Amino acid sequence: MDQSSSLKFLGSWADSHTHRVRLALKLKGLVFEYQEEDSVNPSPALLLHNPIYKKVPALLHDGRPVVESLVILQYIDETWTDNPIMPADPFERAIVRFWCHFADDKLGPAVGLVFSSAGEGQKAAVDQVHGNLKLLERELRDGAFKGRRFFGGDNIGMLDIVLGCGSYWLAVFEEVMEVKLVDPDTFPLFHAWLRDFEEQKEVKETIPPIDKLLEYARGIRQMMLSLSTDTSTSTTTIGAPATGSTTSNNDAAVEEIGLLQESLAL
Amino acid sequence: MAEGENKGLVLLDFWVSPFGQRCRIALAEKGVEYEYREENLRDKSPLLLKSNPVHKKIPVLIDHGMPVCESLNIVQYIDEKWPDRAPLLPANPYARAQARFWADLVEKKVHPPSAFHLFVSCAAPGEAHFLRKFTYCIRFQMYESGTKLWKLKGEAQEEAKKEFIEIFKLLEGELGDKKYFGGETFGLVDIALVPFTAWFYSYEACANLSTEKEAPKLVSWAKRCRERESVSKSLPDPLKVYEFVCFLKKVYGIE
């Protein structure tokens, strides 16, 4: 693929949105320079290129920044038009966009809540995840994606990238939180799709090893539990500092948790 | 337009919804005819529930029986379906990315529920369920950081005002001296934002938030937009919006 321009991409190794962009770049066969960002201490470059949100990922194409993963993915697709990740038909494109927003607005936050809550709150969050997965399962079974290997058809498309880069957290949280999220009997099609997706060469090259993700998740969970004042009940989210003053260590930990929750998009 | 070309275009909507208005503006910009159907949000039609089973919300654009949901989705669909006239997104991929970024920012940050705190100057904990009904009734999502609602009287409102002013400044920075957010061409970002200008009067009346004072460039931009027939025909009279806010406050016993 002819690539006469320069591509640089700022990301964080455990961030799902970063993985989305990395996977899209790989699928397009693009060469890029990568800069790892510390999510709690953004570099001057990140602050310069994403002054409003101050978050990864940020793609720099010939020095010009594009931010927000869904915007970046569409930008990549429209700039390098081989191996399209979006369908051509306007109605199909609308369906893809709808479910991408569903992933970001509903499924991702629900999964994040499973991780950051306990007791009754966690049970409610797990139910929410199941409700969301049921909707996706239905689309795979009878709806817009019926009969397809991937959401994009025979090849990985934008929705596969968006859902897939982050769905590995489901397995991680199942282990760390000891909850069942993706039961293959209840969600056979989603389960099969996820396994197939994770077997793809470019996906394997993108997603970090599961033991690293497990270690990371366990670390964050420990931090959360040590910050919370009441782990036995409740509908509130762990991770908010106890009322009263917090040390600067706690502040950084809370910020890290917040960033993790945000990055846990599916 | 060929005869029957637009047969079967139906927009399920609610008159005061800024999200619905985005769709009306886009359809008008493209000169596309459609049937407008007003939904009773307390008694949603079977068609709405069938067309948007996931969220059960308006707006929904039904094109020959195929539903498209979510307002910015619908606007982009309209743009891609009728590419031969009045483009709502620029041709250049980088400019398109900028437009999508800002439209997404409007979606995230300029949201009637933020304005909700402007309307409701005091919310005792016991009124929470009324507040939820309020927001559900007019389709707006509860956009809250939980602590805001429980703060002392007036404090939530002051914080909401501060947030709004910051967002206005951000948007004015992006607008600059351009005619529209899209430059010379009225486009996606303008469409995303302009419906909220019908709420400026209500912000002022309820929360003493003067957009003339805090965001004069946005006010001028809003006037320019209203000169377009697509906008003037799609946006409600700000006084009617204010009446609506007052009506809801009364219904739910909020003051």
Image (tube, grey):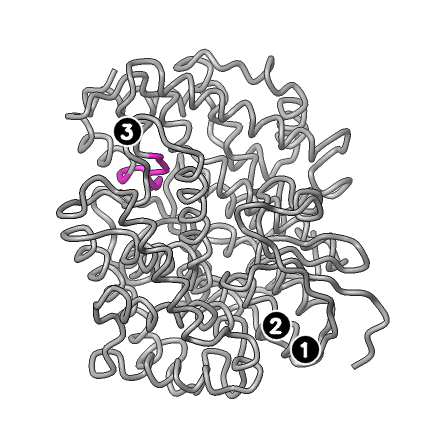
| Quarter of the figure with residue A179 | bottom left
| Residue at left offset 60%, top offset 13% | B213
Chain letter of the residue carrying label 3: A
| Residue at left offset 40%, top offset 54% | A105
Percent x, y for residue A118? 20, 52
Taking depth in this image into account, of A168 and A223 the one nearest to the observer is A223
| B130 relative to A77, above or below | above
Chain letter of the residue carrying label 2: A
The residue wearing badge 3 is: A243
Q: Main secondary structure of the magenta part?
A: loop
| A45 relative to B225, above or below | below
Percent x, y for residue B133? 22, 36
Task: Tell us which disc is closer to us: 2 or 3.
Answer: 3
Is the residue under label 3 in contact with that under label 2 (CB below 8 Å)? no
Highlighted range, magenta: B136-145
| Residue at left offset 41%, top offset 14% | B207
Crowding near the residue tagged with mark 1, few <14, some 14–19, many ≥20 C-alpha atoms within 10 Å: some
Are the numbered discs 2 and 1 placed on the same chain, yes or no?
yes
Percent x, y for residue B91? 75, 58
N-terminal of the pair, mark 2 or mark 3, is: 2
Q: Amino acid at mark 2?
A: Ala
| Distance in Å between CA atoms under marks 2 and 3 | 43 Å
N-terminal of the pair, mark 3 or mark 1, is: 1
On the rendered image, what quadrant is the N terminus of chain B found in? bottom right
Taking depth in this image into account, of A172 and B170 the one nearest to the observer is A172
Is the residue under label 1 in contact with that under label 2 (CB below 8 Å)? yes
Residue B141 lies in magenta, yes or no?
A: yes
Which structural element holds mark 1? Answer: loop
The residue wearing badge 1 is: A28
